Amino acid sequence: MYAAASDKVEDFAIMKQLMMQFPFAQIIDSSLNASSVPVVWQNDESRYGHLIGHLAAGNSLLETAQQQRCLVIFQSNDHYISPNWYEKGPAVPTWNYASVHVWGTFNTVNDEQTEQILKEQIQCFEPELVSSSKMADEQVQQSLLHSIVGFTLSIEQIRAKKKLGQHRSDADQKGVYQNLLHSSEPNSQAMAQFLARNGMDKG
């Protein structure tokens, strides 16, 4: 991962927050086979913890990635940034985003562990659903479990960046935030909210 000095994230707590906030990630194995899948970060006794998730039983990644070192990419909201939004020029267009790159060993798990991973994912993304009458009954759930395979990925290395215009003046940061905030585009609103959560609204 390339990151300018102003964009580097060194604090693991921030990396963890980004992984949890943007859990829909891309898993890429050494043969460049890839899949997009929701994953959940979990703490353990290791330095960085591990990821859990599941893939469709027919996904070739289950074979090509098994016990292999893989890359997992987490990506935040992103948006084009116009130089016209800055207080002073000249400037060039750019793009704002945050990203976390994780490297680790991918391992599939057995049926019982897959069921537990699925429960933990539901608990993470929609805990109310656990006891909801809209959930499939036990027989249907067991049938569906045969179509997925759970996995874990132990995190061995991690890098992150936030490219949000931190190096710009307060006036420039405010200009970017205000233009995004007052846009009617949903992506603009999402990016404005992300900037505000990161103290980049200068409002």
Image: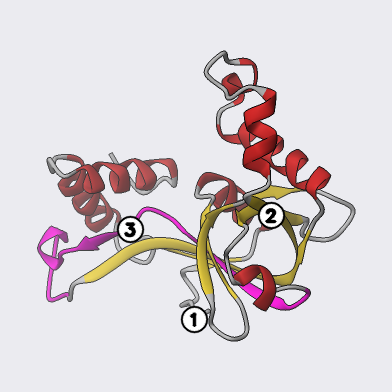
**Circle 3: residue type:** Asp
80 part of magenta stretch: yes
Quarter of the image with the C terminus is top left
**What residue would you read off at disc 3?**
78
Residue 183 position within the rendered picture, expressed as x and y whole percent measured from the top left = 13, 43
* Magenta region: 67-91
For the residue carrying disc 3, how many other residues have a C-alpha within 10 Å: few (<14), some (14-19), or many (20+)? some
Circle nearer the N terminus (2, 3):
3
Q: Nearer the viewer, mark 3 or mark 1?
A: 3
* Residue 156 seen in render: no
- Classify mark 1: helix, strand or loop: loop
On the image, the x and y values in percent for residue 102 come to 64, 68
Residue under the point 15% across and 64% down: 82
Q: Residue furthest bottom?
A: 31
Residue beneath the point at 78% across and 56% down: 49
Local secondary structure at mark 2: strand
* Closer to viewer: mark 2 or mark 3: 2
Q: Position of residue 54 (x, y in %)?
A: 64, 52
Query: Which of 11/156 is in front?
Result: 156
Q: Which residue is mark 2?
A: 149
Q: Is residue 124 visible?
A: yes
The amino acid marked with disc number 2 is: Val
How many angstroms separate mark 2 from mark 3 (CA)?
31 Å
Seen in the picture, residue 135 relative to 94 is either above or below; the reply is above
Lower sequence index among marks 2 and 1: 1
Cα distance in 3D space between marks 2 and 1: 33 Å
Left or right, residue 77 beside residue 149: left
Q: Which residue is mark 1?
A: 2
Label 2 crowd bin: few (<14), some (14–19), many (20+), radius 10 Å: many
